[in-house]
Image (tube, helix red, strand yellow):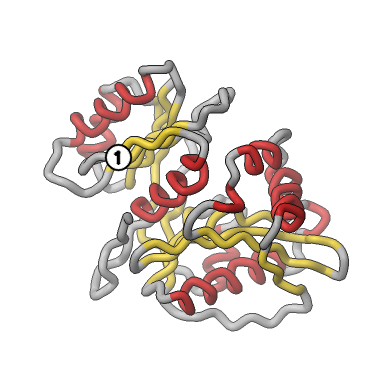
Amino acid sequence: MIKGMAVDGVIPSSIPNLAGFVASTVGRVGVVHRSDAVICVRSPIPVANGAVNGAFVLESDVPPSESIAEAVVFFGEVGSPFVAWVPEEDDALASAAQQAGGVLEPDLSPDMWIDRPIAVTSSFEMRVASDADGFAAVARVCEEAYGLDGMAWLMEHHEMLDAPGVTWAAAWDGDEPVGAGCAFFDGDTGGIYYIATPSGSARRGVAGTVTSWLTNLLLDQGARSVVLQATAAGYPVYQRLGFDTRGRLKHYRFE
């Protein structure tokens, strides 16, 4: 189990939870490499870039250059592209990624967290995806919202419905799913992922409803804090809900 940082006076990093989530979902039918310094997850499905495959360096006494080298060797065995996630303030790790051939992506992901429940007032009905049909609805919403052809198939192929520690849910407006997302509980920390709102459901409070519901679910399950990595579009929503920003995460792409 990967545990997040203690909440007592310390703002939690989302990287340990993110690593656990990718290992639980993509790693179900993929390959997971774990050591004291790094967790690497590789999908068996060839992709055009490394967005599905990730390397996550953990806090340890191992020098950053050795951690990155370990990831390069793992993914290099099959020539698979991957992305290494690096906190913006970690200059040593960023330098190691660059020296190993990583290319810094222009986007940065705000690293956000909250440790209190969020009031939810919404006309949408939240439903947990408990079977294949329910998960198929979630996956279709994600594919439409993210505009990635084949995303639903990829989620189903990776058997993400049965990923340990993950709860998938959709917001429904009558008979129509209008938004989706999932919660991952691991140790003291919960994480929120795959928040998806198709364009036809935008500006209706769907993302806020889904995020609030998942946050409260994780806190009820025993999480001491809930973390997420925000997109540019989602950042204002999470701010309004009360999420604080710890820092930002860089993405170094290795081809």
Residue 145 position (above or below residue 153): below
Residue 230 position (above or below residue 91): below
Q: Is residue 194 left or right of residue 86?
A: right
Relative depth, front residue between 60 and 119: 60
User: At x 52% / y 67%, what residue is drawn?
Assistant: 239
Where, quadrant-wise, is the N terminus in this rendering?
Answer: bottom left
User: At x 55% / y 65%, what residue is drawn?
Assistant: 238
**Residue 126 x, y percent position in the rendering:** 70, 71
**Residue 125 x, y percent position in the rendering:** 75, 74
Q: Is residue 123 visible?
A: yes
Where, quadrant-wise, is the C terminus in this rendering?
Answer: top left
Mark 1 belongs to which amino acid?
Answer: Arg
Residue 167 position (above or below residue 137): below
User: At x 41% / y 56%, what residue is drawn?
Assistant: 111
User: At x 36% / y 18%, what residue is drawn?
Assistant: 76
- In terms of image quadrants, where is residue 122? bottom right
Residue 30 position (above or below residue 36): above
Farthest-out residue, right: 175
**Residue 149 x, y percent position in the rendering:** 73, 34
**Residue 92 x, y percent position in the rendering:** 20, 38
Q: Secondary structure at mark 1?
A: strand
How many residues crowd around disc 1 within 10 Å: few (fewer than 14), some, or many (20 or more)?
few
Q: Is residue 126 left or right of residue 25?
A: right
Q: Is residue 105 visible?
A: no
The residue where tag 1 is placed is: 34
Farthest-out residue, left: 61
> How many circles with numbers are drawn on the protein?
1
- In terms of image quadrants, where is residue 180? bottom right
